[in-house]
Amino acid sequence: MSSISDKTPVMKARGARARLLALAATLATALLTACGGGSGDSSITPASDTGAAMVTLQDAAGDFQSYTVDVVSLKLTKADGAVVETVPATTRVDFEQLVDLSELISAGQIPSGEYVGATITLDYGNASIVAEDASGGSEALTPLDVNGNPLTGTLDLAVQLDNRHHLFISRARTARLAFDFNLAASNSVDVANATVTVSPMIQATVVPPADIAVRVRGALVSADTGGNSYTVNVRPFHLGSGTAGQVVVHTTDTTQYEIDGTAYSGADGLAALAAEPAGTITAAFGQLSTSDYSFTAKRVYAGTSVESNTVDRVRGVVTARNGDVLTVRGATLDRRAGGFEFLRGDVTVNVADATRVTEEGATGSFGIGDISVGQRIWATGTATIDDTTSTASFDATAGHVRLEITPMWGLVTGTVGNPLTLDLRAIDGRMPAIFDFSGTGATAASDAKASAYVADTGTLDLSGLAVGAPARVFGFPVPFGTATGVDFNAQTLVSYSQVRNQLFLDWSSGGSASAFPGLTGTSTTLDLSLDAVGRVHFIQTGPLHQNLLSLASAPQIVGDAMASDTAYVIGHAHARRVENYQAFGDFITALAGDLGGTQKVLGIAASGTYDATSNVFTADQLAVLVND
């Protein structure tokens, strides 16, 4: 295997991986109104010319701290050219909150027919886009169009579904439509100049991956304790009224609940939910069945554990603790009066013995002593904002703090075994340098250290780990002030061998006319030329980056013949059009045709598996951005 280096500057990676967010985000949110039928009662029997569609939206982690835009409208296009027009009320969404998660944005009725594409409109006039700078701080970015002009108004994007996989809507069956951000292909970040260039790209498919975690947010309609289920009117994101369809949420004896700040498990949780009044807001996390698209929840939150009009809510990661004062970075504030915002500065969160503490997925007894540095939290209380410094103080002394499962990336050091020692490279997506671990240990000598962070892995399988290779752990830091050799209790572990590879590449001087030498409509591989390569040119594995220029030759890209949920995308930057393909051959044929004239390739982003021995990148997702 070629050597791997992690010396690539943080923002080069983030700029490279950040091109798709704006437009994918828009399409999904617009669909919630188009497919959900706006406000009204979704329990009404549908007309004979409509059908149900389960529409989801997925995002990847770490490219922006916040990416908030306003969705204005959506038009769905049928195969016969007919257009189903919808102009919903403007919906404001921060798509960075969709991390390793797919949101159910519609389960409602839309007119029957064969749909081949869509056109969406979003408004950047009040966009809030924030990325991490080289020191771990927050940088507000000004959005630009592909010509370098400030993007201050609306932006339209035409999205074309794969010709072999259109969206068919009928009363006889439930349809499935999934949108997935290719974050490396839609937004190019320039932190030095505090700008982000938006180039529309989105992956859309009726054949989504089967293992995606899904969130279903909605207002409670009823609960069936005998049938182990409850029904909600879907209200994704921050939708405060109306419905985007109705869904039955199935539960099991192992489903975990948190309702009004109290934890339950199994039947006790469903009984507590049944006691809540109709209209109570719920949020369930689980998976959709691939056969009938039924949804089964692993975790359920309801009541004030989701939202409240009497308290503010803040979510972020604890970067320091001094007594009962927590410092939280990367915080999103949900105001009790409605609306939300990302806070670029630190948030000071005050807790006390009266603060109620729960832990995600657990029913035990917890207190403020369990809140340590590196812990991701969700808290309720009262916020005070200093608009001049973008900082805030938050009083949770009589409120509630939920400890959320926290992800950490690191390189395995020492030997492979339990406990596992990691040289940390990211904590909840933030660089370790911003964390102050003072006070985490039982003594100062046992305080946690980012360079030698110790995780108790219990009975987790460590066979895929290797010294010097990256690993990702999910779990909870040990209680504050108690560490004596273990800093973190891991519940899940992802080894180097299981980490997906990402390939990112752009070309300078307006793109390359020879990016794919020898490309024809019948090519079975995609060869690369690194001539006139731009700032971005690496293969990423977790937090590590392999410089493509350090290889003996440029890697070759092939399609993944074994995957059924492939997505190959061509984006046209100036035309603002996106073509989606599931078959690699169809994608190659279309790409060769698109590049037959004066068009140039601006950049590519691929996800899959890289074999360093053969220097072949097998992609199940691939996006190419061209300049027409």
Image (tube, helix red, strand yellow):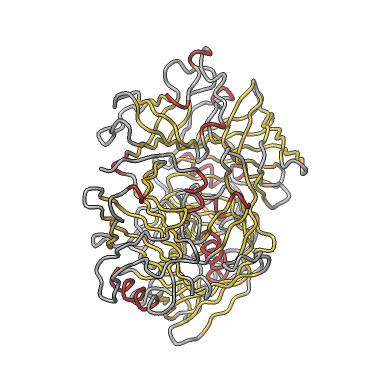
Q: Position of residue 602 (x, y in %)?
A: 46, 65
451 lies left or right of 574: left
In the picture shown, does residue 530 fall above or below 433? below
Comparing 533 with 555, the one in front is: 533
Comparing 74 with 401, the one in front is: 74
Q: Which residue lies furthest to the left in this view?
A: 614
Q: Where is residue 57 in the image (x, y as percent from the top left)?
A: 48, 60
Residue at image point 49% right, 35% down: 427
Q: Position of residue 114 (x, y in %)?
A: 42, 80
Quadrant holding the N terminus: top left
User: Taking the image as drawn, is residue 499 in sight?
Assistant: yes
User: Taking the image as drawn, is residue 219 in sight?
Assistant: no
Q: Position of residue 536 (x, y in %)?
A: 45, 53
Residue at image point 37% right, 54% down: 503
In the picture shown, does residue 260 fall above or below 162? above
In the picture shown, does residue 266 fall above or below 204? above
Residue 505 occupies which quadrant of the picture?
bottom left
Total numbered badges shown on the rendered structure: 0
Residue 465 occupies which quadrant of the picture?
top left
392 lies left or right of 186: right
